[in-house]
Image (spheres, grey):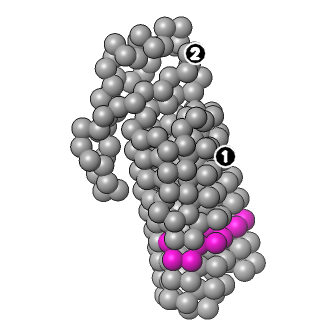
């Protein structure tokens, strides 16, 4: 570690390029290895947030989590290669699971939970993707809800009640009739409305 204040690093070449970045934690070989000015980042795992330079307020836990990120901010990626390509304008995303949101290069305000959930998403926004390989067809789509493991596959396009930002919740109302009509053979759907 070269500069910055209140940084913690543990691992070979973790936080080695830091110039003015502060309040960063890097645990694992090459974690935040090229970070220069990106502040308030946490990278735990081999090459987590490795390519990050100026992106701030990211949390990446797992080998290669957000490894290719350079400038994206305000993301949470947990799992091996979660949001691996989370670069550029990708912000306010949550990706939990191996390869979840792996190609999210310009994605905004998405929740992607499950192994390979939303793996193909690039610049999609305001999506809620749940389950293994859910939302695999969504690349640039917005305001979708996708749930894996149900037959037929469930993908709803919804209208947000309020314009979401990083600081506000995405309010989505899904009519119960739409869920029941689509998920005839599926187990009981455990939600009526998400907030």
Marks 1 and 2, how far apart at CA: 23 Å
Q: Is the N terminus in the top left, top right, bottom left or bottom right quadrant? A: bottom right
Looking at the image, which residue is at 52% across and 13% down?
187
How would you classify the magenta stretch by its main secondary structure? Answer: loop
Residue 50 located within the stretch drawn in magenta: yes
Nearer-the-camera pick, 40 or 147: 147
Q: Which residue is mark 2?
A: 151
Residue 35 located within the stretch drawn in magenta: no
Q: Position of residue 122 (x, y in %)?
A: 55, 50
- Residue range corresponding to the magenta coloring: 46-55
Mark 1 or mark 2: which comes first in sequence? 1
Looking at the image, which residue is at 31% across and 54% down?
165
Q: Which residue is mark 1?
A: 98
127 relative to 159 in the view: left or right = right
Q: Position of residue 120 (x, y in %)?
A: 61, 44
In the rendered structure, are the residues bearing label 1 and label 2 in contact, judged by CB atoms less than 8 Å apart? no
């Amino acid at each position: 570690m070269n500069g910055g204040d209140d940084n913690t690093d543990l691992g070979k070449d973790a936080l080695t390029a830091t110039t003015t970045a502060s309040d960063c934690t890097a645990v694992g070989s090459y974690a935040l290895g090229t970070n220069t000015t990106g502040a308030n980042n946490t990278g735990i795992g081999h090459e987590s947030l490795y390519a990050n330079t100026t992106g701030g307020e990211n949390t990446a836990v797992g080998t290669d989590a957000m490894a290719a990120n350079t400038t994206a901010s305000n993301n949470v990626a947990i799992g091996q290669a979660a949001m691996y390509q989370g670069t550029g304008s990708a912000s306010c995303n949550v990706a939990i699971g191996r390869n979840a949101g792996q190609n999210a290069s310009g994605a905004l305000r998405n929740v992607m939970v499950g192994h390979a959930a939303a793996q193909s998403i690039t610049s999609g926004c305001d999506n809620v993707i749940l389950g293994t390989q859910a939302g695999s067809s969504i690349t640039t789509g917005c305001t979708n809800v996708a749930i894996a493991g149900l037959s037929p596959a469930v993908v709803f396009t919804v209208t947000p009640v309020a314009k979401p930002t990083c600081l506000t919740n995405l309010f989505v109302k899904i009519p119960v009739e739409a869920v029941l009509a689509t998920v005839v053979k599926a187990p009981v759907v455990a939600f009526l409305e998400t907030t």
